[in-house]
Image: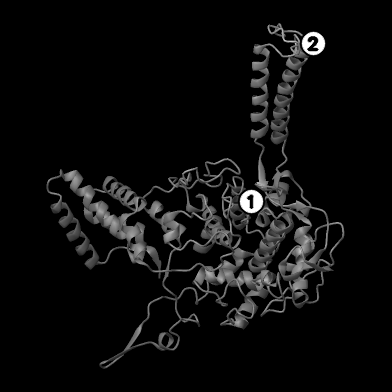
Amino acid sequence: RVVDRLLASQRYGERWGRHWLDVARFADSNGFDENIAHANAWRYRDYVVESFNRDKPFDRFVTEQLAGDLLPFDSETQQHEQLIATGFLSIGPKVLAETDQAKMRMDIIDEQIDTTGRAFMALTLGCARCHDHKFDPIDTADYYGLAGIFKSTLTMTKYTKVAEWHEHLLPSAEAKATKAAFEARIAAKKKAIAELEGRADSGAGLQPARNKQQDDKAGSKPAPQIEAQLKKLKEELAALEKEGPNLPSAMGVTEDKIVDVAIHLRGDPLKLGEVVPRHAPPVLRGPHVPEFSDKQSGRRELADWLVDPNHPLTARVIVNRVWRWHFGKGLVRSIDNFGLLGERPSHPELLDWLARRFVADGWSIKSLHRMIVMSSTYQQSSNRSRETSGENESLTTSAAGDPDNRLFSRADVRRLEAEAIRDAILATSGQLDTTMGGSLLKLKNRAYFFDHTSKDLTTYDSRRRSIYLPVVRNHVYSVFQLLDFPDPAVTSGDRATTVVASQALLMLNSDIVMQAAGSFAERLIADLDNDDLRLTRLYAIAFGRPPTPDERLADLAFLNSVEQAQSNENADMQRKKAWSTLCHVVLASNEFLYVR
């Protein structure tokens, strides 16, 4: 019942959707040379959260992200969802000031191929752009067979500086009304300008000639008041056209001219070889050989091929990702690389069985979760128990024979991710705002994140869950950066976990931790009238258990010593300071920050 309750919670999609956003290299900014705002990228993030909450079958999830604009739909809501899903192909980083347009286009295609390969197949397809893959059976022709699919896809509407990405207008009655009202305002401005210009041309309101020079013709220039009105109206029209109608839109891709791509010798778009028909890599085709129509880009066919139940990689890759997100390491340790340079699976038969079961269960991620967390492997303790024989003490056979826990003979101690740490701190202190969805970005679409002094204009003062905080490429939120947030410019299925002194200093000195400790203390003092009850509540909220007798004695002694050190303060301030300090210690403790 506990498992089902947690899977049914709306918080589930926020927690597990964040994992997929690592894979999708989600960000609210472009990064690279022109770090401008993806002000509508939040719609893709919300689509991911909602998809996980609804347990959308993973095969459908893949298909919508690659070809949602090509799928039929039964409602306006479904149409919007599918258009938003194609943001997966659009939100990657781009060199928007690249002067070589052919190179820019191929760089964008390369990023899409590489991300698609890593995300769904854990293959480094981008390595075959300039030459045959050095380690995996993917040759240059296979790369350009895929490149034709993405070159037949419209990602950018403008390639000149600064280049602009395509956005889907999300059709609705409200959007149509907004657009009509905007067009009416534009038409009214243009009509007023035309009427004033007509009055000037007809001689009405023309200024008399004061200068008797031969080349000065009376009436050749509008009167000053009309000229001023014209200038004002034209400025208003220009500002209105620049502002746009503020219609709901989403980053995404659509169809372009259907083309096959020639091999670029050594990756140079100016040195072309043989034209390669669009195709999937032969080494992975299996019994299903996709046929690419000359009427569509091929994204739909590519997606159908990827989610074929007999595809050798797709199900195994996502099962391995989910396993890693539960256990801290995958059955294949190299999460984003199943190729020759990747690691061999520790339990190949288990991976195969889980993949087959996953497909048989309708590609249901929630069913996979339920199976994993109900297993005895998941429910093991991380304690390394010891055997004692006389004066000899040694680790049990499982720990001694499997020191790296490659065989999953026990649970691993793992630190929470950056977002989970921040969210846990806010939730424990009673400050967490659980409002779902929407954007916290305060910049307009395509606006720069840094002003002329290189000052970052992004703020992180919201108490919303961390998944909703802006993700700025090249300048990740400093708290997250210290806690190993991944590079949002590339697919990251396996976050690093470092242990450095700056992380301890963060927990000691960060404003968010100190403010949360103060709020937590105020909450305990206000709700309960004695220190014993407060300690019990503190441990229950922070650790999910009561304090041991030794902990209770030590904590009460600590509170007393802090109060005595504040003897110049009144009793209320002494109590608040003591409890704030103890709460701070708890929030910075290993038990709070680590899963055991």
- Up/down of 559 relative to 501, above or below: above
Residue 79, percent from left and from top? 73, 48
Q: Which residue is mark 1?
A: 97
Residue where numbered disc 2 is placed: 202
Give the side of residue 554 with respect to residue 269, left or right. left
Q: Judging from the image, what secondary structure is the residue with disc 1 in?
A: loop
Q: How is the image coloured?
A: one colour
Q: Amino acid at mark 1?
A: Ala
Q: Position of residue 476 (x, y in %)?
A: 48, 55
Looking at the image, tell me whether mark 1 or mark 2 is earlier in sequence order: 1
Q: Residue at x 16, y 52 (%)?
A: 563
Q: Is residue 335 above or below residue 577?
A: below
| Quadrant assignment, res 230 | top right
For badge 2, the amino acid type reads Ser
Left/right of residue 227 with respect to residue 416 in the rendered view: right
Q: Tell me the quadrant of the picture where the C terminus can be found.
A: bottom left
Query: Which residue of the protein is positioned furthest toward the front in this rendering?
Result: 214
Dot label at residue 14 = none
Do tag 1 and tag 2 residues touch (Cβ < 8 Å)?
Answer: no
Compared to 221, does 530 lie above or below? below
Task: From the top left corner, tell me how far across and down residue 463 is, in percent.
Answer: 43, 47
Q: Look at the numbered disc 2 and give the secondary structure of its residue.
A: helix
> Around disc 1, counting alpha carbons within 10 Å, would you say few (fewer than 14), some (14 to 19), or many (20 or more)?
some
In-front residue for pair 496/69: 496
Badge 2: residue crowd in 10 Å (few <14, some 14–19, many ≥20): few
Question: Can you say whether 388 is above or below 492 in the image?
Answer: below
Q: Nearer the viewer, residue 194 or 37?
A: 194
Q: Is residue 36 left or right of residue 572?
A: right
Q: Residue at x 70, y 71 (%)?
A: 130
Nearest the viewer among 409 and 266 is 266
Q: Toward which corner of the image does residue 39 lie, by quadrant?
A: top right
Q: Residue at x 77, y 58 (%)?
A: 151
